[in-house]
Image (tube, rainbow, N blue to C red):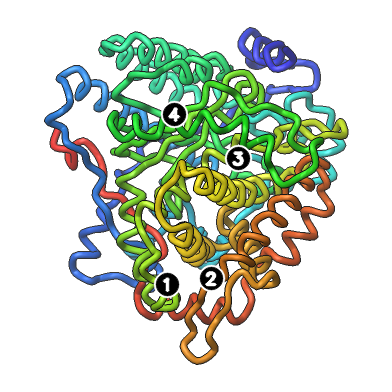
Amino acid sequence: MMKSIITACFIVVLFTTCKNDSTENKVEDVVTNSEDYPNFEAFYSKGDLDENLKKYTPFTLTTDVTKLSESEIAIIKKLIEASKHIDEMFWYEAYGNKDKLLSSIDNEKTKLFAQINYGPWDRLNGNAPFIDGVGEKAKGSNFYPADMTKEEFEKSNLKSKESLYTFIRRDNNGKLIAVPYFRQFKKQVTEVSRLLDEAAELSENEAFKKYLKLRSKAMLDDEYQASDMAWLDMKDNHLEVVIGPIETYEDQLYGFKAAHEAYVLIKDMAWSKRLEKYAQFLPDLQKGLPVSQAYKNESPGRDTELNAYDVIHYSGDCNAGSKTIAINLPNDEEVQLEKGTRRLQLKNAMKAKFDKILEPIADELIDPKQRHHITFDAFFSNTMFHEVAHGLGIKNTINGKGTIRKALKEHASALEEGKADMLGLYMINQLHERGEISGDIMDYYVTFMTSIFRSVRFGASSAHGKANMIRFNYFDEMGAFTRDEKTGHYSVNSENLNKAMNQLSELILTLQGDGDYDKVAALVADKGVIKAQLQADLDRLSDLGIPVDVVFNQGVDVLGI
């Protein structure tokens, strides 16, 4: 209700004040005439890559367009056009003026690397600057004033300062104010809203049409809950779009601010049908979590889906640095508890990372006797149940500290990703014992272990990378794996891994439920680091030219539409 009151105040009195949320100063311009995303393959095909660009390998995002109707093709064009405006908004959130930065770079490879990273900081190297003179990346990116201290923020009485959808700025007198996204990005959200409305008019699927209409409206007022509900109501839509300010990873100061991103997707109806059965097990698996009852009293929403997709376009946050291969949404805790979530498995992007990255890592680091356990089915399942596991545990602290996200602030994302990893493996173990998942359990364990090496390379600036560092060090202490000093190969100890899985799951769930910021910070400081031996092994991967992640060749021309 308070958010609605504040939003209404901004709509009616844009250039006056709303109690303490004064917006009397002029909103900064967001550049919209940026050049298109560069063609990485033009450098790659010539072998003309520097050390930074070698961290990435290209992959073309496409699908069988012959299965699409004329109206679906027209909708896709609208959604991809809308996604380009999302890219502009994320550039501003991550850095600021994109064109000013790019025009200052003479070297084309450096310019390309800046575009991959949405700024002059290397996201796969702890956000280290790769352009002289730019300084360190601000923890709060461009969501907060560069000169703002935490003490100043916490003492301010701005009623919407912790909102997902406000920038913190200074008025003409230097006082902190909150500027809503819909006002800061007026030009962009107006265009996105128009394109979503036009796509809705083309849709022959009524549920998809309703979602697009509501999402269009939400872009103009930052009220997303109704469209989140409508998104979960869609069941038989062939096309899919995830668009808006969604994840809070980019805000590493507090984890309060959502960044803009967009995915355009084609649902694999047959594959999605095969995944339907797993959602029914969530309530029972919640009851069996390896933690005391107080930390699992919430019930996961019943309207939970698992679907598989070909992704055909990424924009914004999900396209920066390491690329997302699975999604669990909505993030709204109220929506999750009332209706559940949808888990989207981006199988073509997932296959790219398996073929181009995971298998080469296994060939170098995993004991030859266990390499046959590395399978795409296990990788797909581990990734899928990671997303499912976001719905397990609890969303609110057990001691009145509010939501876990607000209690743990900038550490919330890393701990949540760690929880999802561990509970995803817990779910696989439980379902395997019940005969609901086939194959050798070691396939899942060894593939899971190998994926730690893949994800830890994302670095400390990534919530996923930090979660994997914590888990690697915890597993090491628990003897979940051994390393042969002569060969440098790793082997999984299934019994110890199982014990480590349960104990780390209990620890994370307890820290979340207690909302214990200090203990979580201590855990991150102690175990969220790459030690010398692991770094040496990761360096072996780099020396062999094994990429860290992918860069997408995407767009209407690539699709041939």
- Which residue appears at 79% of the width and 40% of the height? 513
Mark nearer the viewer, 4 or 1: 1
Q: Are marks 2 and 1 in contact (CB under 8 Å)?
A: yes
The residue labelled by disc 1 is: 370
Q: Which mark is residue 41?
A: none
Q: Amino acid at mark 4?
A: Ile
- Which residue appears at 24% of the width and 27% of the height? 77
* Left or right of 556 on screen, residue 433: right
Q: Which mark is residue 492?
A: 2
Residue 362 in percent (x, y) is at 40, 71
Q: Are marks 3 and 4 in contact (CB under 8 Å)?
A: no
The residues bearing labels 4 and 1 have C-alpha atoms spaced at a distance of: 41 Å
Crowd rating for badge 4 (residues with CA inside 10 Å; few <14, some 14–19, many 20+): many
The residue labelled by disc 3 is: 248
Q: Are marks 3 and 2 in contact (CB under 8 Å)?
A: no
Mark nearer the viewer, 3 or 1: 1
When the figure is inspected, residue 448 is found, relative to residue 249, above or below; the finding is: below
